[in-house]
Image (spheres, rainbow, N blue to C red):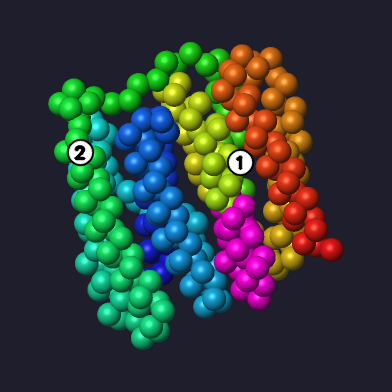
């Protein structure tokens, strides 16, 4: 039951993130969608914590998220329907649970879903007829090889974020480490935007597909893999920001400069945790 809910929240995160990047995070709609996606991440976090504490393994395969891509209006109507469906669903599940904390979490998921539906309705109501009937469009100007590289790095960062989240939920014996990993995961969500925004602005759909989560491995092995991933990303991105094509995009360079410093900091922090 909880893993099904987890998959639903995961699907919502991806849908709202993709749409946000397509609109642009500096636009009112893009900013609103980013805010909703971050709230959905907290929903997934609460469920992941419970699953971890119960000794379970979070299933990172996103659930289905049906949506009508015809226009902004049809997309927002799809989001409203999705969130409204979750309200009775979560309240109903809460009534089946004896644990008071889990019951409170499920009820909270329900009333926050109601707020999300109302916020999406407000976004829809504020759209001009032209914007409501339209869709964000990209320039389709990036070289194919460069675009594919951005997609690859985006998906890698997305999976790095998921691995950190999973590790934070499995680190039940060390709450401080769990929260530190959660903090790094939120930072990675910002880092993946570096690639996702460039991909979306060019007109492509950002690629976010979960890979293997190393289920069954010990926390120590997962942690060492997480450090390895951060260090490898730092090495790749240090080289990438000097790439000739990359240097043509000043906005990307600025964001990468920040990401590289953040990755170096993360690698040092995680290295200290092993001492």
Q: Position of residue 237 (x, y in %)?
A: 70, 32
Q: Position of residue 119 (x, y in %)?
A: 25, 48
- In the displayed structure, would residue 107 be above or below residue 229? below
Labels 1 and 2: the sequence-earlier one: 2
Q: Nearer the viewer, mark 1 or mark 2?
A: 2
Q: Which residues are magenta?
A: 161-184
Q: Position of residue 34 (x, y in %)?
A: 40, 42
Q: Is residue 244 magenta?
A: no
Residue 118: which numbered mark, if any?
none
Between residue 72 and residue 211, name the one nearer to us. 72
Secondary element under disc 2, as helix, strand or loop, is helix
Quarter where residue 67 is shown:
top left
- In the displayed structure, would residue 197 be above or below residue 7? above
Label 2: which residue?
Answer: 124
Q: In this view of the protein, can residue 141 be seen by the observer?
A: yes
Q: Position of residue 252 (x, y in %)?
A: 59, 25
Q: Is residue 166 magenta?
A: yes
- In the displayed structure, would residue 37 be above or below residue 259? below
From mark 1 to mark 2, how far is it between C-alphas? 33 Å
Horizontal arrangement in the rendering, residue 167 relative to residue 17 (left or right): right
At horizontal 48% and vertical 73% (from top left) the residue drawn is: 50
Disc 1 crowd, CA 10 A, few/some/many (<14, 14-19, 20+): many
Label 1: which residue?
Answer: 156
**Residue occupying the far bottom of the picture:** 98
Quadrant containing the C terminus is bottom right
């Amino acid at each position: 039951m909880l893993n099904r809910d987890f998959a639903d929240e995961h699907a919502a995160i991806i849908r709202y993130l993709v749409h946000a990047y397509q609109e642009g995070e500096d636009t009112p709609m893009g900013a609103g969608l980013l805010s909703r996606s971050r709230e959905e991440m907290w929903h997934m976090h609460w469920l992941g914590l419970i699953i971890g504490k119960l000794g379970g393994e979070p299933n990172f395969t996103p659930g289905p998220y049906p949506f009508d891509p015809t226009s902004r209006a049809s997309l927002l109507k799809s989001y409203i329907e999705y969130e409204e469906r979750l309200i009775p669903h979560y309240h109903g599940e809460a009534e089946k649970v004896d644990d008071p904390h889990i019951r409170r979490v499920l009820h909270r998921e329900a009333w926050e879903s109601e707020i999300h539906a109302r916020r999406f309705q407000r976004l829809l109501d504020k759209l001009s007829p032209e914007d409501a009937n339209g869709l964000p469009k990209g320039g389709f100007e990036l070289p194919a090889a460069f675009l594919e590289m951005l997609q690859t790095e985006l998906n890698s960062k997305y999976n790095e974020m998921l691995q950190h989240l999973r590790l934070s939920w499995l680190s039940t014996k060390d709450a401080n480490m769990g929260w530190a990993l959660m903090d790094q995961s939120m930072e990675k969500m910002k880092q993946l935007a570096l690639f996702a925004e460039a991909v979306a602005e060019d007109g492509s759909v950002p690629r976010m597909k979960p890979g293997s989560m190393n289920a069954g491995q010990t926390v120590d092995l997962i942690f060492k893999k997480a450090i390895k991933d951060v260090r490898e990303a730092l090495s790749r991105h240090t080289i990438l920001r000097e790439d000739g094509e990359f240097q043509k995009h000043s906005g990307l360079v600025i964001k990468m400069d920040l990401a590289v410093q953040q990755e170096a900091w993360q690698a040092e922090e995680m290295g200290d945790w092993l001492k």
